[in-house]
Image (cartoon, rainbow, N blue to C red):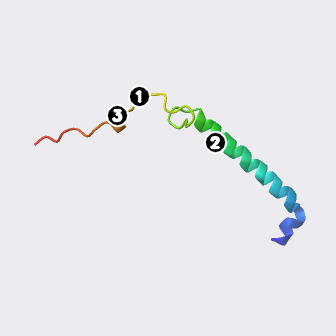
Amino acid sequence: MWRIWRLYDPLRAMVVQGIFLFGLAAMIHLILLSTNKFNWMDGAKTAPTAQNAPMPKASS
């Protein structure tokens, strides 16, 4: 493992990793904000779906 760190500067590697992870998190959040289902700022823009409908009455 020490040979890898002789090729790369540890500080630079951690800074690049932090920038990459921040960019990835920002991209994921912006993608979720652009959807109707997962937009937590404006709320759902559609009416409740059949998934939230009550169960049908059982026939006997």
Above or below, comparing residue 47 to residue 58 in the picture:
above
Which residue is located at x 57 percent, y 35 percent?
41
The quadrant where residue 40 appears? top right
Q: Which residue is mark 3?
A: 50
Work out whether mark 2 precedes mark 1 in sequence or the reverse, and give the earlier one.
2
Above or below, comparing residue 21 to residue 31 in the picture:
below
Which residue is located at x 34 percent, y 34 percent?
50
Q: The C terminus is located in which quarter?
A: top left
Above or below, comparing residue 8 to residue 46 in the picture:
below
Residue 46, image x, y percentages = 45, 28
Which residue is located at x 59 percent, y 35 percent?
33
Residue 20, image x, y percentages = 75, 48
The quadrant where residue 32 appears? top right
Q: Is residue 35 left or right of residue 27?
A: left
- Closer to the eye: label 2 or 1: 1
- Amino acid type shown at disc 3: Ala
- Amino acid type shown at disc 1: Ala
59 or 41, nearer to the observer: 41
Is disc 2 placed on a helix, strand or loop?
helix
Work out whether mark 3 precedes mark 2 in sequence or the reverse, and give the earlier one.
2
Pointer 2: residues within 10 angstroms few (<14), some, or many (20+)?
few
Is disc 3 placed on a helix, strand or loop?
helix
Q: Is residue 10 left or right of residue 42?
A: right
- Amino acid type shown at disc 2: Ile
Q: Which residue is mark 1?
A: 47
